[in-house]
Amino acid sequence: MRLITAALMAATVFGATAAHAEMKLTSKDLVAGKTMADAQVFNGFGCSGKNISPELAWSGAPEGTKSFAVMAYDPDAPTGSGWWHWSVFNIPADASNIATGASGDKKLPAGAVEGHTDFGASGYGGACPPVGDKPHRYQFTVYALKLDKLPLPETAPGAMVGFYVRANTLDKATIEVTYGR
């Protein structure tokens, strides 16, 4: 009887682990812990990058995921509140990636909405830290959400999108890169 009980307990523990794989985020354009390529650097504010949004692919979303959101954030910006570089929300639950350069080119998954960045416009705004600052960290995070759609307009700023995203997150995965000048 003890052997059967132990087997059932093991099956329950290992079965629960297998039922929810950890969310993973990968990118052909971003390498975790490495310097961001010029392709993803802002073109303006003294920076001369190409400002191309990176490719992002995710897997392992938990059961109950009804939509996704992607956010890019610089916690090292000298603002007291960081800097929002990108927010995409209302990404359908059957989506698993965003293509390179999708921002602003109508290549986002159907129904996805880009909120405003701290640059003051919607769409991707690449890295552009102040000259002489230590390299900044840029965190690209995909969130699995328990809502089909966030009740936000396209003009929603990153902090507002972040509030709704965090309040409705089931799981998330992040890639962090750096950039300095």
Image (cartoon, rainbow, N blue to C red):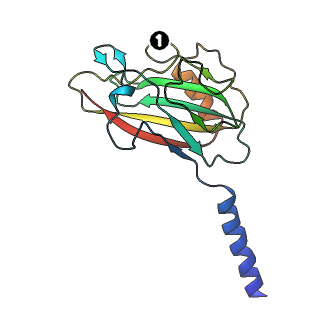
Residue 13 image position (x, y, % from top left): 68, 68
| Front one among 151 and 67 | 67
Q: Quadrant of residue 52?
A: top left
Residue in the picture at 43% in, 14% down:
119
Q: Is residue 154 above or below residue 179?
A: above
Residue 161 image position (x, y, % from top left): 58, 24
Q: Is residue 166 above or below residue 118?
A: below
Q: Quadrant of residue 176?
A: top left
Residue 128 image position (x, y, % from top left): 33, 22
Residue in the picture at 47% in, 35% down:
140
Residue in the picture at 45% in, 41% down:
175
Q: From this viewpoint, which residue is outermost toward the left?
A: 132
Dot 1, crowdedness within 10 Å: few (<14), some or many (≥20)? Answer: some
Secondary structure at numbered mark 1: loop
Question: Which amino acid type is shown beneath numbered disc 1?
Answer: Gly
Residue 131 image position (x, y, % from top left): 23, 22
| Front one among 180 and 159 | 180
Position of the C terminus, as image quadrant, is: top left
Residue in the picture at 32% in, 23% down:
78
| Front one among 83 and 180 | 180
Q: Is residue 88 above or below residue 16?
A: above
Relative placement, left or right, of 16 versus 142 is: right
Tell me the residue that label 1 is attached to.
Answer: 120
